Image: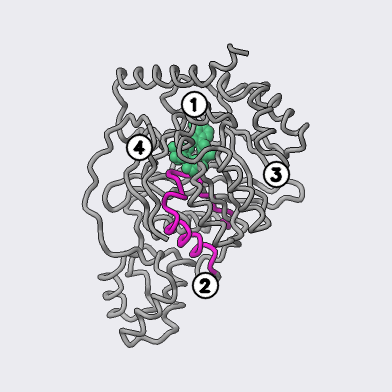
Amino acid sequence: MGPEPAPQTRSLPLFNLPAAGKRDLRPGLSGVPSGEVAAWLTSRGQPAYRTRQIADHLWSAAAQSVDELHTLPQAVRAQLGSEFRLCTLAETEVRPADNGLTQKALHRLDDGRLIESVLMRYPARGWRRARATVCISSQAGCAVGCPFCATGELGFARDLEVAEIVDQVRFWRHWLAGVGQRLTNVVFMGMGEPLLNTERVLAAAAAITDRERFGLGARHVTISTSGIVPGMEQLIAARPQYTLAVSLHAARPELRDVLVPLNRRYPVDTVVAAAGRYAVATGRRVSYEYVMIEGINDTADDAAALVQLLGAQSTHVNLIPMNPVAHTPWQPSSLERTEAFALVLRSAGIGTTVRRNRGVDIGAACGQLAADQGGAPTPAAVARRRELLETRSAAALAYRSRG
Ligand code: SAH
Ligand code: SF4
């Protein structure tokens, strides 16, 4: 399958992303499949069991440099170090929130690009076991340009390589081991659109779920997409057991064109139809994400349109209050409006959860920390963007005054 075509979106990036530094061309070792590591060792006259030794260092001990591979002979370490990078995250800064239940990491890559990952811990409750979910990035920036999203504001910088994705998981596994906890779930809900970097995202998910490497159950991995239909088709063909989450945010096409600009290319009904095919192919229920924006997508009409769109699909909807981080003219819906919206969905038999926003105080909607590093956009640029969004959303909402 060839690379996905670049999406034609009309995004409104506010930042001039700084020019990237030089890339280190050595591949990250955690992104190399075990078979290739074995072949590399064999070609250097090394016994097969060294593959296991390397895997143990990478996955159990989360080694950061070749010096830590102490079970390998010095010469093999040196050769490995000259051809591969042990860790692709050059620097990481961790910030806590929610009394430490949420931890957000800003990672600097070797070319200076910044990405984010977030750890969310949920203590055991009743029969539910404690969970530690890591939300990871798949791209630096994002080309889709949803106007309520901090990553969308940044625009697109580049795809992450497999090891850059996987090393975020290794980082948090190691961090959790330090406090005696285990990582239980991985969600591709950080920066970027996973299904515009599908091959690498699938390779990273394979590493995370491979018993010889990270060994997480496939059902504990969630891939979230804004609705890239060709990428969804690729997933359907692969029939993995990953959970698919689809970011809808609006059922009416006119409004979704504004909130998820890629809707012009992959219309919402084709996205929902593809999600239905994924559910049939994998036997897994698809979940839908819906960011609640006061007065924009949270009315009784919007809820009714959503019920109609989802039809008889067996599905689950997560309602997420918009994190007021981006430079938008909008506010999150009140809890009252959100509950009223949820009631319409539940009455139609659609399982619905009202999510609490985690880590708002550290800007947990991904992209915020990276955006802060980019410096503040000029007030004139922010004002222009707000005005444009108000005009576009008003045009999309004109049907209401027409009755
Ligand atoms: N690009 C993918 C995955 C990353 S975004 C996607 O859009 O699905 C992950 C989730 O965070 C999406 O559901 C997105 O809509 C949500 N999100 C982005 N900005 C947000 C904000 N300001 N408040 C609440 N959720 C937000
Ligand atoms: Fe990209 Fe997802 Fe943000 Fe939209 S919500 S801009 S698709 S990261």
Dot 1 falls on a residue whose secondary structure is loop
Q: Is residue 79 magenta?
A: no
- Compared to residue 306, the image places residue 181 above or below, namely below
Task: Look at label 3 and name its amino acid.
Answer: Gln
Question: Where is residue 129 drawn, in percent x and y?
Answer: 69, 52
In depth, the one of 333 and 59 nearer the eye is 333
Which mark is on residue 155? 4
Q: Give yes or no for contact between labels 1 and 3 (Cβ–Cβ under 8 Å).
A: no
Is the CB of the residue bearing disc 1 within 8 angstroms of ligand 1?
yes
Answer whether labels 4 and 2 touch (C-beta < 8 Å): no
Mark nearer the N terminus (4 vs 2): 4
> Which badge, 1 or 2, is on the more N-terminal residue?
2
Mark 4 Cα-neighbour bin, 10 Å: few <14, some 14–19, many ≥20: many
Q: In which quarter of the image is the N terminus?
A: bottom left
Q: How crowded is mark 2: few (under 14 residues within 10 Å), some or many (20 or more)?
A: some
Q: SS class of the residue under badge 4?
A: loop
**Distance of label 1 from label 4 (alpha carbons):** 18 Å
> How many angstroms separate mark 1 from mark 3 (CA)?
31 Å
What's the CA distance linking mark 4 and mark 3? 33 Å
Amino acid carrying label 2: it is: Glu
Q: Name the residue under label 3.
A: 313
Q: How far apart are marks 1 and 2 (CA)?
A: 41 Å
Residue span colored magenta? 181-210
Is the residue marked by circle 3 packed among few (<14), some (14-19), or many (20+) residues within 10 Å?
Answer: some
- Which residue was labeled with disc 2? 212
Instruction: Determine the residue located farthest toward the top in the rendered image.
Output: 401
Q: Can residue 294 be seen in this view?
A: yes
